[in-house]
Amino acid sequence: MRDFLNILLALGALQGFITSILLFTYKQRSHANRLLAYITLIISLACLNLYFLETIVNPGPVWKVLAAVIPLIILMPLGPL
């Protein structure tokens, strides 16, 4: 069951990345499309971070430093957006 949920997280993040790329490259570049693309990208990064936290069993020191310096869970800007 846990593997199934991890696969759902990975596929959801991939779908979010594809959707945000399509919204960024759409011919009519309106503010609404860019805002939706940014929100989708932020949520996809949070899903990807949860996937990495669940699947990486023994992270190396480089991964720990990167996780401490660059936090991928940045859901706080969603309120002002």
Image (cartoon, rainbow, N blue to C red):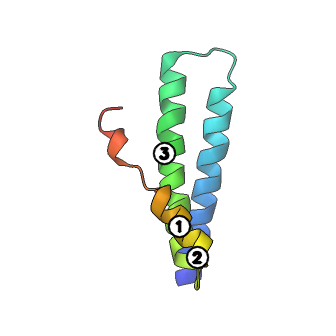
Q: Where is residue 6 in the image (x, y as percent from the top left)?
A: 57, 73
Q: Position of residue 47 (x, y in %)?
A: 51, 59
Q: Are marks 1 and 3 in contact (CB under 8 Å)?
A: no
User: Regarding mark 1 in the picture, which secondary structure is present there?
Assistant: helix
Res 41 → quadrant: top right
Q: Residue 4: in sight, yes or no?
A: no
Q: Position of residue 34 (x, y in %)?
A: 53, 25
Give the residue number, with chain letter if any, for mark 2.
61
Q: Where is residue 73 in the image (x, y as percent from the top left)?
A: 43, 56
- Of the numbered discs 2 and 3, the one sitting upstream in the chain is 3
Crowd tier of the residue under label 2, counting other residues whose Cα lies within 10 Å: few below 14, some 14–19, many 20 or above = few
* Mark pair 1, 3: CA separation: 21 Å
User: Regarding mark 3 in the picture, which secondary structure is present there?
Assistant: helix
* Mark pair 1, 2: CA separation: 6 Å
Question: Which dot marks residue 42?
Answer: 3
Res 14 → quadrant: bottom right
Q: Residue at x 51, y 73 (%)?
A: 53
Residue type at tag 1 = Val
- Of the numbered discs 1 and 3, the one sitting upstream in the chain is 3
9 relative to 35, above or below: below
Q: Which residue is drawn at 61% across and 78% down?
A: 60
Crowd tier of the residue under label 1, counting other residues whose Cα lies within 10 Å: few below 14, some 14–19, many 20 or above = few
Give the residue number, with chain letter if any, for mark 1.
65
Is residue 61 shown left or right of residue 76? right
Quarter of the image that includes the C terminus: top left
Of circles 2 and 3, the one toward us is 2
Q: 59 or 40, which lies in front? A: 59
Q: Do the residues labelled 1 and 2 touch (CB within 8 Å)?
A: yes
Q: 33 or 75, which lies in front? A: 75
Crowd tier of the residue under label 3, counting other residues whose Cα lies within 10 Å: few below 14, some 14–19, many 20 or above = many
Residue type at tag 3 = Ile
21 relative to 44, above or below: above
